[in-house]
């Protein structure tokens, strides 16, 4: 539990001390206002705590770093809302904008607010600016003098000439979150007792929003992922190592109708040929030396009702490809050492960093299996082909490591410029490794180009500004012209390339002059 302020931290600490007899000693209480709060939280999670209770915005940051962790956000409760209303001076008209987090209590709140002679109240989402602005304006027309609402409405309230009472989660919201934790842990333990999970089981933690990138290529990838998630057909994801193929597979699973089912993954190149068959299809007791007496289910059985992700499918042994083809055709498997067919309902998502068409020509991959897998194709582009994404990816990764290691680093513009010139053969994985090392070894707030000597085998040579500008021009001349032809505005192009509009006008003019010069010659 991470308290957002010292007063609340002391209040919770005092409460926990008076309730030690109720076996609440396993709660880690952290003062979120101190400098090492993130480091202390990391140690608590690594110690195996089942759930974390936080206030925003820290909750979102921690959820991004630890997607597998149960995160419970403290939101305003009915008690917090009523306490805010009581802050309005007597004899004044008070209105309330009820947040969506309390929509389940709206009917009861309406009765309570009518009993308190509250003349105006409505329900509005904290993220819908248009609805919030309309609600505030309606409150002003109703003659409201004091308005209770979330932090997002303060400017609107002031602009309408009303007094503002901030609705923030306090003690009531904390109690509400705490009981949600108890209920979640109880349900989790009951489900574990009734449905023992496989030790090889895996949950899909990533969603499409976790995949960073706004370039044209990545927009196409995400668009295809949304379309393919709605189908049941087999998907083949291609791309170099480190581009995030498994993240994309998990995101597709979480958007599909199978998201409540299991998501299991296996790297076909990391398991020996002799073990891969039993891992995929299972085996009966005594089918080979060292086999369990009771036998064992394979990944296809364990993933029944969900998704099975076959990573590096291009490295699957040729003889075993025939067994996989039969499963895709018959939708049933046979355990090793058994003649009984077991029906399975599994969606296959395969991935590879190899050219499977070339592998087919080289007789390393079966043609019929290739056509069975390549029903729906998605290619994840390497980082060097979407250089406009490098800056946002690097900054997002650094924010994650800042939270993870309790740092406050930021990237200097010279580092971002240098990163955009690198080929990154290891793609996002290589960039993440570089940034993690930087976050650990650099002590200053701003990471500069000279700091890269600590984490890269060949220290970068600071390029001459004229050479760097020349390379940028060579790279973007035709790209800008292409975007013009696609109908994009100057503002859209500037935003995508992260340069000014005047630079675009100047570069395009030089490009046109160059074309006229070549035409005259």
Image (cartoon, grey):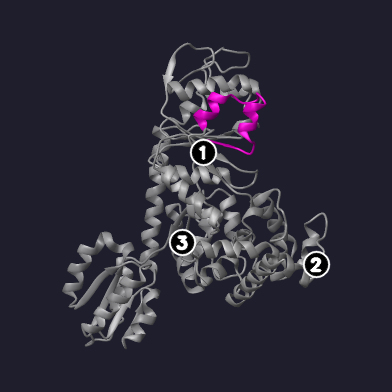
Is 241 drawn above or below residue 467 in the view shown?
Answer: above
Q: Say which quarter of the image contains residue 367.
A: top right
Asked if one can make out residue 268 in the rendered structure from this viewpoint, the answer is: no
Q: Secondary structure under badge 1?
A: loop
For the residues bearing labels 1 and 3, Cβ distance under 8 angstroms: no
Q: Is residue 371 magenta?
A: yes
Mark 1 and mark 2 lie on one chain; the one further toward the N terminus is: 1
Residue 404 image offset from top left, x and y in percent = 61, 58
Q: Say which quarter of the image contains residue 478.
A: bottom right
The residue sitting at 46% across, 51% down in the picture is 223
Q: Which mark is residue 165?
A: none
Q: Is residue 505 magenta?
A: no
Q: Secondary structure under badge 2?
A: loop
As drawn, the residue found furthest toward the front would be: 520
The residue sitting at 41% across, 28% down in the picture is 345
Mark 1 and mark 3 lie on one chain; the one further toward the N terminus is: 3
The residue sitting at 55% across, 40% down in the picture is 237
Over which residues does the magenta segment extend? Answer: 350-373
From the viewer's perspective, is the residue at label 3 or at label 2 nearer?
2
Q: Secondary structure under badge 3?
A: helix
The residue wearing badge 1 is: 202
Q: Which mark is residue 462?
A: 2
From the viewer's perspective, is the residue at label 1 or at label 3 nearer?
1
Front position in the image: 124 or 12:
124
Quarter of the image where the C terminus is located:
bottom right
Q: Classify mark 2: residues with Cα within 10 Å, few (<14), some (14-19) or many (20+).
A: few
Is 325 drawn above or below residue 246 in the view shown?
Answer: above
| Marks 1 and 2, how far apart at CA | 44 Å
Asked if one can make out residue 125 in the rendered structure from this viewpoint, the answer is: yes
Front position in the image: 202 or 356:
356
């Amino acid at each position: 539990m991470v308290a957002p302020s010292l007063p609340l931290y002391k209040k919770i600490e005092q409460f926990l001390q008076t309730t030690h007899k109720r076996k609440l000693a396993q709660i880690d209480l952290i003062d979120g206002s101190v400098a090492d709060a993130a480091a202390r939280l990391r140690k608590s999670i690594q110690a195996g705590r089942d759930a974390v209770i936080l206030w925003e915005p820290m909750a979102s940051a921690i959820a991004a770093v630890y997607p597998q962790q149960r995160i419970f956000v403290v939101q305003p409760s009915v008690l917090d809302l009523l306490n805010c209303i009581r802050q309005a001076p007597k004899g004044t008209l008070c209105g309330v904008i009820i947040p969506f987090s309390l929509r389940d209590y709206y009917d009861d709140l309406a009765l309570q607010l009518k009993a308190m002679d509250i003349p105006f109240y409505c329900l509005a989402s904290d993220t819908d600016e248009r609805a919030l602005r309309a609600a505030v304006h309606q409150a002003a027309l109703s003659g409201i003098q004091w308005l209770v609402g979330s932090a997002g409405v303060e400017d609107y309230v002031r602009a309408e000439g009303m007094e503002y009472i901030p609705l923030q989660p306090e003690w009531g919201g904390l109690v509400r979150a705490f009981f949600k934790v108890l209920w979640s842990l109880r349900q989790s333990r009951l489900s574990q007792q009734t449905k023992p999970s496989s030790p090889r089981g895996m949950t899909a933690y990533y969603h499409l929003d976790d995949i960073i990138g706004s370039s044209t290529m990545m927009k196409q990838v995400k668009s295809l992922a949304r379309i393919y998630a709605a189908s049941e057909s087999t998907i083949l994801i291609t791309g170099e190592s480190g581009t995030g193929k498994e993240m994309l597979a998990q995101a597709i699973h979480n958007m599909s109708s199978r998201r409540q089912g299991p998501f299991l993954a296996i790297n076909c190149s990391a398991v020996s040929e002799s073990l891969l068959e039993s891992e995929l299809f299972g085996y009966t007791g005594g089918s080979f030396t060292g086999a369990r007496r009771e036998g064992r289910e394979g990944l296809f059985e364990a993933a029944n009702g969900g998704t099975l992700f076959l990573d590096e499918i291009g490295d699957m042994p040729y003889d075993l490809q025939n067994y996989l083809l039969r499963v895709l055709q018959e939708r049933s498997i046979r355990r090793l050492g058994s003649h009984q067919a077991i029906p399975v309902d599994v969606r296959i998502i395969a991935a590879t960093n190899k050219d499977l068409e070339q592998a087919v020509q080289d007789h390393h991959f079966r043609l019929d299996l290739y056509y069975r897998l390549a029903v729906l194709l998605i290619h994840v582009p390497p980082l060097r082909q979407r250089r406009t994404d490098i800056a946002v990816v690097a900054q997002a990764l650094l924010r994650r490591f800042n939270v993870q290691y309790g740092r406050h680093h930021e990237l200097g513009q010279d580092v971002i410029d240098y990163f955009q010139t690198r080929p990154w053969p290891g793609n996002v994985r290589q960039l993440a490794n570089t940034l993690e090392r930087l976050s650990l070894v650099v002590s200053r707030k701003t990471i500069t180009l000279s700091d890269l000597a600590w984490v890269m085998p060949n220290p970068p040579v600071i390029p001459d500004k004229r050479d760097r500008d020349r390379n940028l021009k060579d790279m973007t001349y035709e790209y800008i012209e292409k975007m013009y032809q696609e109908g994009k505005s100057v503002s859209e192009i500037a935003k995508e390339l992260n340069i000014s509009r005047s630079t675009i006008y100047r570069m395009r003019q030089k490009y046109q002059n160059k074309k006229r010069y070549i035409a005259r010659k």
